Amino acid sequence: MLGPNGAGKTTTVGMLTTLVTPTGGRAIVGGIDVVAHPPLAKQVIGVMPQTNTLDRALTVWENLYYHGLYFGMSARAARGVAEEMLDRFRLGNRAGSPVTALSGGMAKRLMMARALVHRPSVLFLDEPTAGLDPQSRIALWEILGELHTEGQTVLLTTHYMEEADSLCSRLAVIDHGRLLAMGTPKDLKESVGADSIVTVSAAGDLDALARVLQERVEGATRSQRVAGTIQLHVKGTGGVLPKVVTAAEHGGFNLTDLSIAEPTLETVFINLTGKDLRE
């Protein structure tokens, strides 16, 4: 699920994981109605929330071991899976450390490992890389890629477009608690109906410039103001920038910056909501 802060991503995850009681409707996760049978639903889901919920009274290894016991594993099985998860999530050298000694990236990896101890059918990750440095984020992406390759079903919420584009095979774009679009990243980007997105910066009346570019640039399908610039959607890529410069100059505008790119998920979101994803 892709959306800005406050879109309703965490609330949705809360309802699907029995932490938030919905005011209406039904939700089925792993074949179980999460409202009618919350204890059963908890047995088939793993949850990694945004906040650090690790037990500070336990070591890294103990956080995994006792989680296994909570889900009915024997002591032997819980020890085995704890060791397996420490190795998989690159935490073996921290097994005896208190969780307070972990970096942010390590704590996130431990929380994900703990969520997988009982082999859930569906793993819920609520903005798992928020606040992480680039190296920790990449490490978590690699682990998620491995899990997905092995067939683990993951529902991931994020407001990072690159993350959604790289990791997800299916995206739901939401804002204000409403589903705006759903499909593969490729399908959503193709829905923009343009081959190129030209971003134009200029002095003067940007609304007037948007109208000029829409009317005079061949292949233009859409022109709009976005965060102090003009975004022009164009079908075709040949000679687009010279056409934009010529059209602007004939309209009496002086351009200060010009760039061209393929449609992105940010473009999709702006088309759907009329605002920048990161507002």
Image: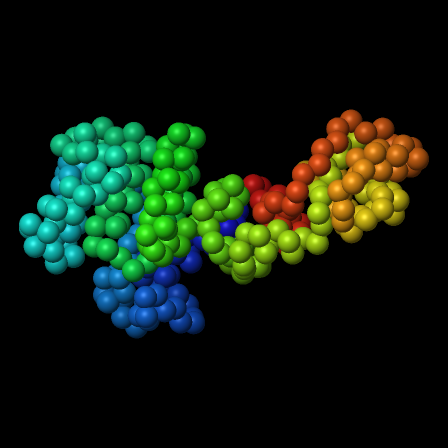
**Residue 28: % across, % down:** 36, 69
Is residue 273 visible to the viewer in this orientation of the structure?
no
Q: How many marks?
A: 0
Q: In the figure, is residue 35 to the left or right of 200?
A: left
Q: Position of residue 105 (x, y in %)?
A: 33, 33
Image coordinates for residue 234, horizontal then vertical, percent? 76, 46
- Residue 243, compared with residue 121, is above or below; it is above
In the image, is residue 13 above or below residue 53? below
- Residue 85 to residue 102: above or below: below
Residue 58, located in which quarter of the rendered image?
A: top left
Please report the residue visible at 59 percent of the width from the left and 56 percent of the height from the top: 187
Q: Is residue 65 left or right of residue 45?
A: left
The C terminus is located in which quarter? top right
Q: Is residue 30 left or right of residue 182?
A: left
At a point 53% along the width and 56% down the height, the residue shown is: 184
- Up-down: is 172 above or below 144? below
Horizontal side of residue 165 vs 138, given as left or right: right
Residue drawn at x 45%, y 46% is 167
In this orientation, does residue 29 appear?
yes
Q: Residue at x 67, y 39 (%)?
A: 261
Pick the residue in front: 157 or 38. 157
Estimate the x, y position of residue 151 in percent, counting from the top left. 34, 55
Depth check, front residue: 15 or 110: 110
